[in-house]
Amino acid sequence: TVSSTTIEGKSGSIVHVVAEDFWQYQKAPEGWPTVAMATCHYTIMMAAGEQSPLSINGICESVDPDGDASVWTAAIDTSTGIGTGSLASGTGKYKGVKALPTFQTTFQIDATHSVYEFKW
């Protein structure tokens, strides 16, 4: 986690987390790199008094090793930790592409970096 802020409400709270992540693409689409770095902005909804999140949603941006940019949206299943992503927009090889991968954390490098594996 690069940064984290919490907005407290009466019946719950919203935690906003910014993270720097390392993405591994398993069976990447033709012409895509097999790895990329991303900055992700996660919104985590918590009910008052609960330890587990109600929902986790994110928006991530990445510029790959070829210099092509992409913006992704994500929703993470709080019971399994598996996320579903959607390529929202991109340049170069990502422009006009429909991509709907699943992903999950495979390794926690340190407090600020995670490795995610993407599958198509």
Image (cartoon, helix red, strand yellow):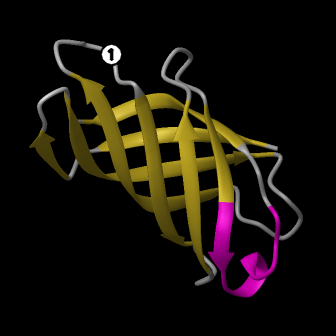
Left or right relative to 1: residue 116: right
Image quadrant assignment for residue 104: top right
Q: Quadrant of the C terminus?
A: top right
**Residue in the foreground of this view, choosing between 57 and 13:** 13
Does the stretch in magenta take in 107?
Answer: no
Left or right relative to 95: residue 73: left
In the rendered image, which residue does mark 1 sit on? 52
Residue pictured at 45% horizontal, 29% vertical:
107
Q: How far across and down, in percent of the image, does residue 112 sit?
A: 25, 44
Does the stretch in magenta take in 92?
Answer: yes
Compared to 40, does 8 lie above or below?
A: above
Q: Circle 1: is it few (<14), some (14-19), or many (20+) Cα within 10 Å?
A: few
Instruction: Count the labels in the image.
Output: 1
Q: How far across and down, in percent of the image, does residue 59 sit?
A: 47, 59
Image quadrant assignment for residue 36: bottom right
Label 1: state its secondary structure. loop
Q: Which residues are magenta?
A: 87-98
Compared to 66, does 109 lie above or below?
A: above
Q: Residue furthest front?
A: 10
Compared to 53, does 72 lie above or below?
A: below
Compared to 54, does 80 lie above or below?
A: above
Say which amino acid is labelled 1.
Ser
Left or right relative to 46: residue 107: right
**Residue in the foreground of this view, choosing between 100 and 106:** 100
Q: How far across and down, in percent of the image, does residue 96 sit?
A: 81, 80
Residue pictured at 37% horizontal, 31% vertical:
108
Residue pictured at 55% horizontal, 26% vertical:
77
Residue pictured at 76% horizontal, 51% vertical:
100
Left or right relative to 25: residue 22: left
Q: Quadrant of the N terminus?
A: top left
Q: How far across and down, in percent of the image, does residue 41 sit?
A: 36, 56
